[in-house]
Amino acid sequence: MTNPAPTNNSLTDVPGFRVGHAAVAGPGALSGTTVVLAPPGGAVAAVDVRGGGPGTRETDALDPRNVVERIDAVVLTGGSAFGLDAAAGVMAWLEEQGRGVR
């Protein structure tokens, strides 16, 4: 048995997935957002929310009892209202691309 070719063990090693990051520049700036974009057609996903005060948006849609079967993107950002609103820009872009739940 041969070992597969070595990888960087990065999410971007998965064919079709793209990752982008943006951050506020400047001294003391503690803000940033990372987006994981699934390939066209989406990807199967699940979530495990933990902690005493998690900031989440749309995670309940991933419950197996609901109609959402695939995701188009995951937004990782701060849990404040500002961080949660960063997902609005990603959702707008997905809508422009004709992606996401209709």
Image (cartoon, rainbow, N blue to C red):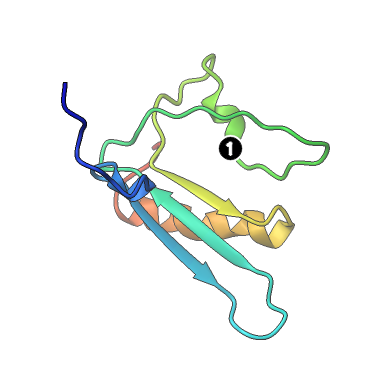
Quadrant position of the C terminus in the picture: top left
Q: Which residue appears farthest toward the left when viewing the image?
A: 2
Q: Is residue 39 above or below residue 64?
A: below
Q: Which residue appears farthest toward the front when viewing the image?
A: 1
Residue 87 as seen in the image, left or right of residue 27: left
Q: Where is residue 21 in the image (x, y as percent from the top left)?
A: 46, 64
The quadrant in which residue 82 appears is bottom right
The quadrant in which residue 29 appears is bottom right
Q: Which residue appears farthest toward the right when viewing the image?
A: 52
Nearer-the-camera pick, 101 or 50: 50
Q: Decide: few, some or many residues near mark 1? Use Cα within 10 Å; few <14, some 14-19, many ≥20.
A: few
The residue at the point 33 percent across, 45 percent down is 99
The quadrant in which residue 49 appears is top right
The residue at the point 57 percent across, 60 percent down is 86
Quadrant position of the N terminus in the picture: top left
Residue 28 as seen in the image, left or right of residue 69: right
The residue at the point 46 percent across, 54 percent down is 35
Q: Which residue appears farthest toward the top when viewing the image?
A: 65
Determine which residue is flagged by label 1: 58
Nearer-the-camera pick, 42 or 1: 1
Q: Position of residue 34 (x, y in %)?
A: 50, 58
The residue at the point 25 percent across, 43 percent down is 6
Residue 32 as seen in the image, left or right of residue 18: right
What amino acid type should be assigned to the residue bearing mark 1?
Answer: Glu
Q: In this view, does 87 lie above or below 102?
A: below
Q: Where is residue 97 in the image (x, y as percent from the top left)?
A: 29, 53
Element marked by disc 1: loop
Q: Total marks drawn?
A: 1
Q: In this view, does 52 lie above or below 69?
A: below
